[in-house]
Image: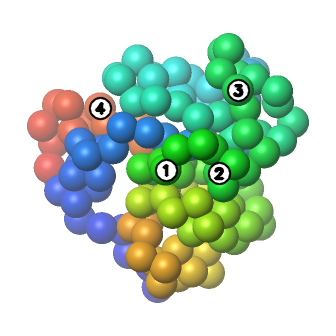
Amino acid sequence: MFVNPPTTEIYSFLKKAKTIAVGGISEREDRASRYVSEYMQRQGYTIYPVNPHLDDWHGLKAYDSVAEVPVAVDIVDVFRRPEFILTVAEDAVEAGAGVLWLQQGIVNDEAAELAAGAGLAVVMDTCIMFAHRSMKLGFEN
C-alpha cells in the first residue's frame, strides 16, 4: 500500500521545483486544473500545459504529452481520472520528471509503483495548491 512522503519532504519538492507540467489542464473556469495551475503560476512556477485537446492555455503552447515538453520538468501534476494515470506515469518517467503528483482524489498504486521504481518521487491524493499554501503558512503536520 502506497504512503505519501512525509510533509517535510513534500515541502522540499515544492521548494526545489521551478517547472510543473500539468496533465489534464483545462480552460474551463470551474475546473480545479485551471485555478490550481493559475495559483502555482502566480507563485512563480513555470507551467507547461499538457492536454492533447488544447493548442494553448493562457497563451502558453499546450503539449500532447509530458515527453514533448522541451525542458525537463520538476513536477508532473496530474488532473486525470485514475484509469488514465498509468499512461501519464509512463510519460513522466520517459520525460525524466522528478515528481509524479496526483491531485486530490486521484489514486493509482500501479502508477505510483512504476514511477517510484524509475526513481521519481510520488505524491498521491494531495492538492499541490493546498500543500503549497500549507508550506507558506509553516504547517508541518
Amino acid type at circle 1 is Ala
At 42% from the left and 76% from the top, the residue drawn is 119
Residue underneath mark 4:
133
Which residue bears the numbered disc 3? 61
Q: Earlier in the sequence, mark 1 or mark 2?
A: 2
User: What number is the disc on residue 72?
Assistant: 1
Q: Is residue 130 left or right of residue 94?
A: left
Q: Is residue 44 above or below residue 108?
A: above
- How far apart, in angstroms, are the residues tagged by discs 1 and 2? 9 Å
Q: Position of residue 53 (x, y in %)?
A: 87, 36
Residue 23 in view, yes or no? no
Mark 4 surroundings: few (<14), some (14-19) or many (≥20) residues within 10 A: some
- Kindly report the distance in space between the C-alpha atoms of the residues bearing marks 3 and 4: 27 Å
The front one of 70 and 103 is 70
The residue to which callout 2 is attached is: 66
Nearer to us: label 4 or label 2: 2
Label 2 crowd (10 A; few <14 / some 14-19 / many >=20): many
